[in-house]
């Protein structure tokens, strides 16, 4: 029994030593990155979306609280639509009236067509009789004039019908506009996210564009960091990357390089070492795969600090293999919940 305990103790000590060695080589902040790799400090971020009103009005209800997780299409808030509903009723009545006017105009066209047919028939008979000298030329001229009048009346009736139909189109457009305003009065989530702030309360009157909520979009979760000019040109868009957050120091999350700044900048405050602050730096962004984020939406939080790792391209175009300490497990979900370290901070990405 004591032999088994001794062996287990030795294995535990050995495992602890190996784990500490890996952490020291790859993850410890003070350790230099291995040859062919670069890293930078950053924090998990996501885009901020302001949910605002398109029209001025009174807030009727807000369906979410700060911290709630929402999905695409969820109702977030509803503006009061009592005035718009009244406008919609008036527009519907105007459409009905315009359609009735079209029906009257179409009846006028039918009447004018019948009058024209009768006048044309009488003109034809008058022309035949006039050729046989049965009626006078004056009577023939009267029938001819009556046919012209009937033809003009038909043209006028048809023009009036077209005008009435255009009035129907105008009233329908007004109705659709009112219906669109009513639809815009219900504010929906454009994608998955978490409510960060409630900026208004039910009963408040907001102007057009007034902010109701601030939403942290979880459709693009990423980490930004800075690399010196000696390393940034050797990082390519689409390259694999790794993220090691402070709350999970023994887990490397897979990521992809989605942005490398086209020009350098001086001394960003996120860079902490004196040597790096004295040089030109390039902003780099690595994005966490969306399927990982969607698998654990309820646990993803922004503002978590950590370290992003990238591989540097060799002169021959190749890249080094990831060392064991930065090889993420093949899993479909995040290995553990990500929690805020005291401050929630989401950036507006480009």
Image: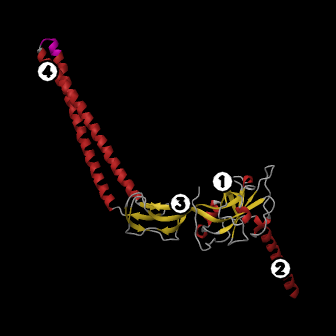
Looking at the rendering, in which quadrant would you find the N terminus?
bottom right
The residue at which mark 3 appears reads as 191
The residue at which mark 2 appears reads as 13
Circle 4 residues within 10 Å: few <14, some 14–19, many ≥20: few
Labels 1 and 3: the sequence-earlier one: 3
**Label 4, label 2: how far apart the Cα atoms are:** 123 Å
Q: Do the residues labelled 1 and 3 touch (CB within 8 Å)?
A: no
Q: Are marks 4 and 2 in contact (CB under 8 Å)?
A: no
Secondary structure beneath disc 1? loop
- Magenta region: which residues? 128-133
Whether residue 349 is visible: yes
Labels 3 and 4: the sequence-earlier one: 4
Q: Does the magenta stretch include residue 72?
A: no
Please state if 215 lies on the left or on the right of 186 as rendered.
right
Residue in the image at 63% along x and 70% along y: 338
Labels 4 and 2: the sequence-earlier one: 2
Residue 192 is situated, as x and y percent measured from the top left of the image, at 55, 62
Whether residue 116 is visible: no
């Amino acid at each position: 029994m004591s032999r088994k305990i001794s062996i287990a103790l030795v294995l535990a000590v050995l495992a602890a030593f190996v784990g500490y060695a890996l952490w020291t080589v790859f993850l410890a902040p003070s350790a230099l990155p291995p040859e062919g790799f670069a890293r930078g400090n950053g924090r998990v971020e996501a885009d901020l979306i302001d949910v605002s009103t398109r029209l001025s009005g009174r807030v009727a209800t807000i369906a979410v609280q700060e911290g709630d997780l929402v999905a695409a299409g969820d109702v977030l808030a509803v503006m009061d639509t009592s005035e718009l509903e009244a406008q919609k009723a008036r527009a519907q009545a105007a459409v009905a009236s315009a359609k009735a006017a079209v029906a009257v105009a179409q009846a006028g066209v039918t009447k004018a067509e019948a009058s024209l047919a009768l006048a044309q028939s009488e003109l034809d008979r008058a022309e035949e009789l006039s050729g046989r000298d049965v009626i006078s030329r004056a009577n023939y001229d009267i029938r001819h004039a009556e046919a012209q009048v009937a033809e003009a009346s038909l043209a006028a009736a048809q023009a009036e019908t077209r005008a009435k139909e255009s009035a129907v189109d105008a009233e329908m457009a007004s109705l659709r506009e009112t219906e669109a305003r009513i639809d815009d009065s219900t504010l929906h989530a454009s994608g998955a996210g978490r409510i960060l702030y409630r900026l208004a309360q039910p009963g408040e009157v907001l102007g057009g564009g007034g902010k109701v909520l601030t939403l942290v979009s979880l459709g693009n979760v990423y980490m930004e960091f800075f690399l010196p000019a000696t390393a940034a040109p050797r990082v390519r868009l689409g390259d694999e990357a790794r993220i090691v957050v402070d709350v999970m120091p023994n887990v490397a999350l897979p990521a992809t390089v989605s942005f490398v700044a086209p020009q350098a900048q001086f001394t960003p405050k996120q860079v902490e070492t004196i040597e790096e602050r004295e040089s030109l730096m390039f902003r780099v962004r690595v994005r966490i795969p969306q399927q990982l984020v969607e698998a654990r939406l309820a646990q993803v939080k922004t503002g978590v600090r950590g370290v992003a790792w990238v591989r540097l391209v060799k002169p021959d175009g190749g890249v080094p293999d990831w060392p064991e300490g930065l090889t993420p497990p093949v899993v479909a979900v995040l290995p553990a919940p990500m929690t805020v370290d005291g401050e929630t901070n989401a950036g507006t990405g480009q």
